Image: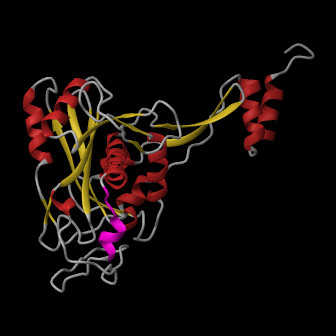
Amino acid sequence: SPNGWYSWRDAVADFLAAKDDPVLLKDWTNTVLGETWQEAGETVDHELLYQRREHYSAPVPWSVEVLTAGIDVQDDRVEFEVVGWGAGEESWSVDYVRLYGDLSRPEIWQILADKLRQSYRRDDGVLMNLAQVCMDSGGHFTDEVYAFSRKLGIDWLIPIKGASQAGKAIATFPKTRNRKGVYLTLVGTDTAKELIYQRYRIQEPGAGYCHWPVKDCFDEDYYKQATAEEKIRKYKHGVAHFEWDAKKRRNEALDCRVYALTAVRILQQHRGLDLEQLSLNRPVPETCEEVQEKPAPSLENRPRRISRSSYLNG
């Protein structure tokens, strides 16, 4: 290059000087390459969660107080995860279902309704139904989701959509129904994902810990989807902001997890659900044993109460 011009040799030398310092590397990327700086994202290794699977002694482990489901809607299918919740929002994944079909036709909606109405047996023999369901309504089938909510019960199946602003509460339940007659609830998706990823990193069972069963529907692809997104700090015009980015990877399992979490928050904030109280007052019967593979230790020392909550049957 002509004398006085910034040469490739200069650029390489500056890169080598900056590569180990994130601040200097950001400046080099912005000024030399003329590109928007994007930091390496915060994520969770899906294999670590996959290796944590447990053998449940029943479809629903004993410590579960309530079941919720989160439904993701795609153009050719619906997917949903059933999650059980205990004290401190300790969670037990129970089921993951994919239903393929034409969502403009009634057949797939009837199949979905039947699936959502099925019961799951808890370790003590109690049959549990879904207490709350949240369903994505932000795609191409908004009207169908609204009609589905009205058909199955507007208080039970809640249409949701992501909040347009970052930092919102996980669930913002409306005071009144919208013009379509449903309780359209806004979801702080970034807030929910932040919490979910924090809980993925919890190593010991207890408040916030996530359990998964050894079950065909929870295959390795599920865990890849559940950890598909990265929290990335991006700089634009010198201003930093955070975004959750799937980088074109499939993330339906993570979305379902967000919606199931939204459902249990609605129960706690608007339906009077108290997971801690239910857990503290329900003693373990002698006939009930919860057998889990490591790393989950025995939960038998936690005090429990024998009584059927109204949440058991939806």
Query: Where residue 210 sits in the image (x, y, percent)?
Result: 37, 61
Task: Identify which residue is drawn at 34% across, 50% down.
Answer: 270
Task: State which quadrant residue 21 falls in.
Answer: top right
Task: State which quadrant residue 241 falls in.
Answer: top right
**Residue 275 belongs to magenta span:** yes
- Residue 113 in sight here: yes
Vertical position of residue 117 compared to residue 308: above or below = above
Name the foreground residue: 209 vs 89.
Answer: 89
Please state the total of marks drawn on the protein image: 0
Name the foreground residue: 27 vs 269.
Answer: 269
Overall secondary structure of the magenta section:
helix
Task: Identify which residue is drawn at 42% across, 43% down.
Answer: 228
**Residue 173 belongs to magenta span:** no
| Residue 223 relative to residue 170: left or right | left
Q: Residue furthest top?
A: 2
- Residue 19 in sight here: no
Task: Identify which residue is drawn at 8% across, 28% down.
Answer: 106
Query: Where residue 51 sits in the image (x, y, percent)?
Result: 36, 63
Q: Quadrant of the N terminus?
A: top right
Q: Which residues are magenta?
A: 272-280
Task: Identify which residue is drawn at 52% across, 36% down.
Answer: 166
